[in-house]
């Protein structure tokens, strides 16, 4: 059983049932250079964004709703260094992200050792545009 798709990380679809999530948090880190001034507080000059991270937390109940295979796919994408596009239900595109962490807390195991509850956290970092061939060739 699966519910409607609420967001996607590359080919991995988050649904209301199955591979679901409980919360998503975003953090933007910007830098400011401190410039010394005479007779007052130091001035600050904005130097730009430094990084943007997203954390997705969720709880899976594999026996009832599934989702363990999808989480394993996310783990495999992280192990292989595949950047993935992150998109919300409303169609907002957050850009390409690198999977930085996949944490799991498997509990309430059945008699075969399989977890009946698996809390997880996926840490993403947005990828910068980097250098393009055009910028290396001087805009040609």
Image (tube, rainbow, N blue to C red):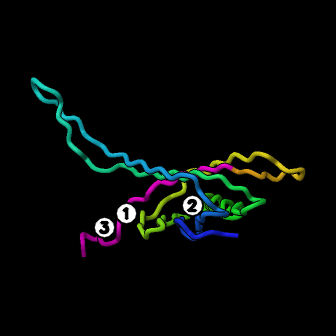
Q: Tell me the crowding category of disc 3: few under 14, some 14 to 19, or many 20 or more residues within 10 angstroms, Cα based.
A: few
Q: Residue furthest top?
A: 39
Residue found at x 42% / y 48%: 27
- Magenta stretch in the rendered image: 119-140
Marks 3 and 1 sit apart, C-alpha to C-alpha, by 13 Å
Residue 108 point in image, percent of width and height:
79, 46
Left of 23 or right of it: where is 67?
right
Image quadrant in which the C terminus is located: bottom left
Marks 3 and 2 sit apart, C-alpha to C-alpha, by 25 Å
Left of 2 or right of it: where is 137?
left
Q: Nearer the viewer, residue 134 or 127?
A: 127
Q: Which residue is mark 1?
A: 129
Q: Secondary structure at mark 2?
A: loop
In the image, which disc is placed on residue 136? 3
Residue 50 point in image, percent of width and height:
35, 49
Left of 38 or right of it: where is 93?
right
The reply to whether the magenta stretch includes residue 70 is no
The reply to whether the magenta stretch includes residue 126 is yes
Residue found at x 26% / y 41%: 32
Q: Secondary structure at mark 3?
A: helix
- Check whether the beta carbons of the residues at disc 3 and disc 1 lie within 8 A of each other: no
Residue found at x 12% / y 25%: 40
Q: Nearer the viewer, mark 3 or mark 2?
A: 2
In the image, which disc is placed on residue 81? 2
Q: Nearer the viewer, residue 66 or 4?
A: 4
Sequence order check, earlier mark of 3 and 1: 1
């Amino acid at each position: 059983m699966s519910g409607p798709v609420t967001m996607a990380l590359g080919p991995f679809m988050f649904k209301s049932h199955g591979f679901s999530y409980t919360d998503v948090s975003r953090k933007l880190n910007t830098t400011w250079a401190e410039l010394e001034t005479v007779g007052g507080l130091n001035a600050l000059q904005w130097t730009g964004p430094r990084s943007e991270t997203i954390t997705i937390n969720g709880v899976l109940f594999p026996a009832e709703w599934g989702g363990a295979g999808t989480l394993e796919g996310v783990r495999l994408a992280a192990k292989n260094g595949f950047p993935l596009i992150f998109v919300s239900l409303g169609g907002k595109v957050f850009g390409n992200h690198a999977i930085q962490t996949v944490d799991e807390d498997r509990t309430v195991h059945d008699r075969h050792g399989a977890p009946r509850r698996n809390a997880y956290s996926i840490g993403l970092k947005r990828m910068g545009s980097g250098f393009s061939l055009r910028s290396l060739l001087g805009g040609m």
